[in-house]
Amino acid sequence: MRFFLESKRHILLALVIYAALRLLFSLGIVSEYIEQVVIYVFIVILAATGLNVIYGYTGQFSLGHAAFYGIGAYTSAYLAKTSGLESIFFFPATILAGGLMAALVAYVIGIPILRLRDDFLGIATLGFGILVRVFFDNSDRISEVLGGSRGFTGIVKLTNLETAFFVTVFLLLVTRNLITSRYGLFWRCIKEDETASASIGINTARMKLMAFVYGCFLAGVAGALYAHLYTFLHPSNFDFLRSIDFLIIVILGGMGNIAGTIYAGFIWVGFIEGLRIALPGNILDLRWVFIPLLLIALMMWRPYGLMTKKKG
Amino acid sequence: MTAVLEVDRLTKSFGGIQAVDGISFKVPPGETLGIIGPNGAGKTTVFNLITRFYTPDSGDIRFMGRSVTHLAPHRLARLGIGRTFQNLRLFRELTVAENITSAYLSGNRYSPFAGIFRTDRHSVVEKKAWQKAYTLMDFLGLAGKGDAPAGSLPYGEQRRLELARALAIEPKLLLIDEPGAGMNPREIRDLVETLRDVKKRFNLTIIMIEHQMGLVMNISDHILVMDFGEKIMQGTPAEVRRDARVIEAYLGEEGPA
């Protein structure tokens, strides 16, 4: 199929990276903890790429991305657990369900709130994120399985290197093709000038909604992979700070730059987890001093991200 | 013959200011209508009402015989009303070619699925879009600049790119807002030539707002003069030049220039 032929360089590169990681994991060179972190990096990259579509490419400022990540995680875990389809065989279906649920919710709330611009949209998505967090906190009233503020426990572990890696690579290629198609072009037009976009016949409301729904779909899929990696979900995993994490990765990698998001995902997760290993236990909390300092430094020297030197 | 555009008693006020006060006019196919008037006369507001960036308070707009007053801006563009802006509104970070292909692609579709999986439909439409972009770039003197960011072009070329972008939607009616703004006399002469060529080649009807009398008198079949949101008069360039009300609106009552 042309999709695979056109991407053969990327696919080849991905296979090499996969083989290297598989080897590293199988030989037992790295600890299980490191393995989990590496898998987590791919999940974070996928979710951040979703935000990059929404914010980096289309210019829609969202502070609620983690809510969709959470919706995907809870949906997929709930489905797997209640239907008893807790096997790797049905895993693709539950992942897809997580993504679709996030997309559906994005569609329903996107219609009213995407009329807002810039910081107003930021506040609306922030509000939505808090709403979802409160919903998760009280979810045990709907179904005991969801666990509410005690957390959702006993999810079967299905996410491994293969699922996380290949789902992410496939969806990154899909995203790349969308970005280089007429849809990605319209998203970039809208980011630059909505009025001019409408004047050349672009249905701006529809294209903005499409970017939002697609970006949230990616977050939902990432959430589903996350749920079945850590096997435990807590509402605090999906709060405002997690949304900020994704935002940092998008800005760090450069707005509207997929390769940048990939590097930034590695750097960001590597940095946070690296500090956890590097710092002695008694000053571990100093991480939350170093991280903001890093961000301040970044904004001063590289305000357009690590990858781009100037505005681009 | 049906008029390409028919504006009927259009009004628009902002707060207490009557920006457009019951204006009516018709533009027959193939005509170039120039709109002139002092600053604040409501010329650009008329454009923004026709393209529906503003909602009219009352009145009707018909395009090719069909009422389009209630349609959204992007629908009007797809029907064939193209426009340029008084202050350039290019996609500055996009390349010159992308500025043009985006306009063509808005009316020439393929599905997201076709885009993702690169079907034949995708290849055919994309190829046509790029051909269109290169044809328009050649035609408007932008050849070889396809990969440059639009914002990096000199001012005169940005104006021409905006025209190329508007032409890429294959319009029947083109609204041009002050194409001569900020141009020197030599550039104005080139612009007159370009607009003549464009009109002939694309079989267009044009409405143009312009302050440069040399340009607007030269190119328009008819001229509509506005002041305080109203139509003062409409006539041929020769008639307008002689009209006492026009001289008054432009120069005050002290006398002719």
Image (tube, grey):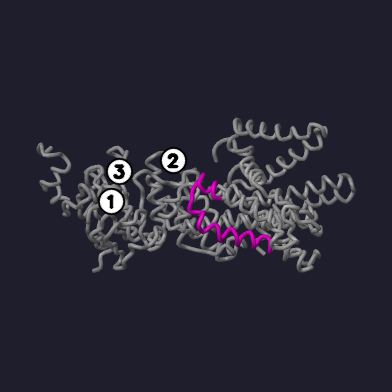
As helix, strand or loop, the secondary structure at mark 3 comes to loop
Q: Quadrant of the C terminus of chain B?
A: top left
Give B175 or B104, whichever is nearer the viewer: B175
Q: Which mark is residue B213?
A: none
Vertical side of B84 occupied by A282: above or below: above
Name the residue tied to disc 1: B13
Furthest residue toward front: A141
Is residue B137 visible to us here? yes
Q: Amino acid at mark 3?
A: Gly
Give the class, few, some or many, for how many residues have Cα within 10 Å of label 2's Cα (few <14, many ≥20). Answer: some
Residue visible at 75% across and 61% down in the picture: A145
Residue A45 placed where, x, y %? 69, 49
Q: Is residue A304 magenta?
A: no
Name the residue tied to disc 2: B153
Q: Depth-wise, is mark 1 or mark 2 nearer the camera?
A: 1
Residue B180 placed where, x, y %? 30, 43
Q: Which residues are magenta?
A: A97-124
Q: Check if mark 3's residue and mark 2's residue have beta carbons within 8 Å.
A: no
Q: Which mark is residue B180?
A: 3
* Distance from Cα at disc 1 to Cα at disc 2: 37 Å
Vertical side of A207 occupied by A261: above or below: above
Taking B77 as reference, is A278 left or right?
right
Q: Depth-wise, is mark 1 or mark 3 nearer the camera?
A: 1
Residue visible at 38% across and 46% down in the picture: B160
Taking B205 as reference, is A145 left or right?
right
Q: Amino acid at mark 1?
A: Ser
* Distance from Cα at disc 3 to Cα at disc 2: 17 Å
Chain bearing tag 2 is B
As helix, strand or loop, the secondary structure at mark 1 comes to strand
Chain bearing tag 1 is B
Q: Earlier in the sequence, mark 1 or mark 3?
A: 1
